[in-house]
Image (cartoon, rainbow, N blue to C red):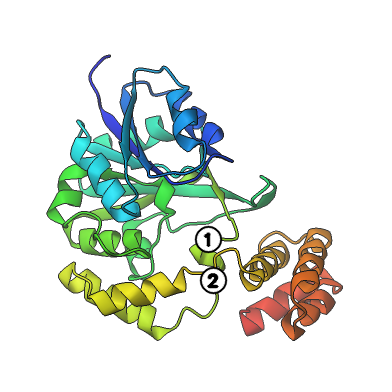
Amino acid sequence: MSEIKISVVMSVYNAEKYLREAIESILYQTFYDFEFIIINDGSTDNSLEIIKSYSDNRIVLIDQINTGLAMALNNGIKKSRSEYIARMDADDVSMPERLEKQYIFLENNLDHIIVGCNGVLIDKDGNYIFTSDQPAYDEDAKKNLPETPFFHSSVMMRKNVILKSGGYLDGLIKGQDTVLFNRMAKFGKFANLKEPLIKYRIVPTANSVRRNIGKRFWKILDKAIESNEISDNDSEYLANLLENRQSDSRVANYHIFLAKKYLWNNYNPKLARKNIYKSIIIKLSFGGLGLFFISLLPETIVKNFYQKFKM
């Protein structure tokens, strides 16, 4: 193997459905000089067998008991041998030129410590939802902190700054990326490449689908950003947030989330109504019925409605 210039780090937990597509999207990059550190975090499905089926010498497998995402990623970073860490998730897809373009950017912009990119958002079945418009420049990327300006699986970061910032916070089972990015912010500039270089999959268990997280969640993250610590009580609260990921309510909310994206971001009332129908079948709600009637309106009225009420 030639000199390793990038370490791609991916944690895997019961991801057999999408795993081959994720792995192959990295192996078929136009940039070759990387190692692909895959942490099998105690999967109980066929994920480990899928990883082992690849003979590419750039793959470095860490097979461990389940520790959670933060510790798994820290283990991968500890094992890494390059100055750049590129994140990848086991249900997403990297476009062929992603690593090459992000590497060139960081090599040419030494004052930048993280570079992400835009994404093509897809649903659990791979259907197109919309293309993101992430903040491209440092000032815009940081102005809404502590909310993260990146897709976690899109970023390439300088490893020395990750370590200087304390790495991913062990025990934090939700918002790990938000805390790390906020702690890194003081050490250099952020950027997102305008080109969509990943396919970012929205699934029913995604944090972005969950509604009404509440003020306590952000208070916990604020404390973690300040101290890089989390109390047992706060950790337990976050664990409760993640319970019942496959509940009827969660799946119904997932389809409402997709319906809104099909109306607000990529006006497609037919697909919006399809998802509203799936939600109502699972759980009848006034919100779902209201969204159905909105989907019958012309595009200009729908967009004006969104701008006025920001649903």
Q: Is residue 308 above or below residue 232?
A: below
Instruction: Looking at this view, name the residue that lies furthest to the top.
Output: 1
Q: Quadrant of the N terminus?
A: top left
Instruction: Check disc 2: other Cα within 10 Å, few if <14, some if 14-19, many if 20+.
Output: some
Instruction: Looking at this view, name the residue that lies furthest to the right.
Output: 296
Query: How many angstroms separate mark 2 from mark 1 (CA)?
Result: 7 Å
Q: Is residue 138 above or below residue 238?
A: above
Quick check: can you spot residue 96? no
For residue 63, side relative to residue 119 (left or right)? left
Name the residue: 44% across, 35% down. Answer: 98
Q: Which residue is the site of mark 1?
A: 206
Q: Which residue is the site of mark 2?
A: 210
Badge 2 vs badge 1, beta-carbon distance below 8 Å: yes
For residue 166, side relative to residue 214 (left or right)? left
Q: Please name whichever residue, 35 or 137, is drawn nearer the observer in this view of the structure.
A: 35
Quick check: can you spot residue 248? yes
Snapshot quadrant of residue 231? bottom left
Going by the numbered disc 2, the residue's amino acid type is Arg
Q: Secondary structure at mark 2?
A: loop
Instruction: Looking at this view, name the residue that lies furthest to the left.
Output: 164
Name the residue: 51% across, 41% down. Answer: 45
Q: Is residue 236 above or below residue 185?
A: below
Q: Please name whichever residue, 302 or 281, is drawn nearer the observer in this view of the structure.
A: 281
Name the residue: 29% across, 33% down. Answer: 7
Q: Secondary structure at mark 1?
A: loop
Q: Position of residue 93 (x, y in %)?
A: 52, 39
Q: Please name whichever residue, 78 or 63, is drawn nearer the observer in this view of the structure.
A: 63
Instruction: Check disc 1: other Cα within 10 Å, few if <14, some if 14-19, many if 20+.
Output: few
Q: Position of residue 289 (x, y in %)?
A: 80, 80
Q: Position of residue 236 (x, y in %)?
A: 33, 74
Going by the numbered disc 1, the residue's amino acid type is Ala
Q: Position of residue 254 (x, y in %)?
A: 64, 65
